[in-house]
Amino acid sequence: MLAVYQTAVGYQLWHALALIGVGLLSFHLPASAPLRWAGALLALGILLFSGSLYLLTLGGVRAGLVTPAGGVCWIVAWALLAWAVLRA
């Protein structure tokens, strides 16, 4: 279970850094709807993906399809972030 916990921590770390990057980028692209959605989906992905893994390792609660839903949020967020940057 330690490996699952470390996976959750690692993904949370990298996506939190990406979320900080989105916040910094929003100073240059303040009216970008894709950028706002990317930030929201990054945060939601952290909550769903890492949160479900934390529930599994710390509480023994299996969250079912919550973990993949968080992964999908991240995929869409990264695509929106790329789109926002390429449009700028």
Image (cartoon, grey):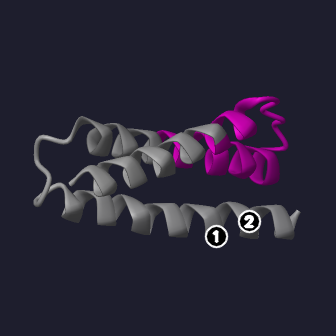
Looking at the image, which residue is at 80% across and 54% down?
Answer: 57
Residue placed farthest to the front in the image? 87
* 46 magenta-colored: yes
Q: Does 32 lie within the magenta span?
A: no
Rendering coords of residue 86 (x, y %): 32, 56
- Which residue is depicted at the point 56% across and 61% down? 12
Please, what secondary structure does the residue beneath circle 2 have?
helix
Front-most of residues 55 and 88:
88
Q: Quadrant of residue 4?
A: bottom right
Locate residue 48: give its quadrant: top right
Residue pictured at 30% horizontal, 49% vertical:
84
Q: Residue lying furthest top in this view?
A: 65
Residue type, label 2 = Thr
Q: Is residue 19 above or below residue 83?
A: below
Crowding near the residue tagged with mark 1, few <14, some 14–19, many ≥20 C-alpha atoms within 10 Å? few
Q: Indicate the position of residue 51 as horizontal and vertical percent values.
A: 63, 46
Q: Amino acid at mark 1?
A: Gly
Residue that badge 1 annotates: 10
Between 10 and 60, the one lying in front of the other is 10
Residue 77: which disc? none
- Pointers 2 and 1 in contact (C-beta within 8 Å): yes
Category of crowding for the residue at label 2, using alpha-carbon neighbours closer than 10 angstroms: few (below 14), some (14–19), many (at least 20): some
Magenta-drawn segment? 44-71
Q: CA distance from mark 2 to mark 1?
A: 5 Å
Depth order, front residue of 9/58: 9
Residue shown at the point (54%, 49%) measured from the top left? 46
Q: Which residue bears the numbered disc 2?
A: 7
Q: Where residue 74 appears, x then y in whole percent? A: 56, 47
Main SS, magenta region, reads: helix
Residue 41 falls in which quadrant of the image?
top left
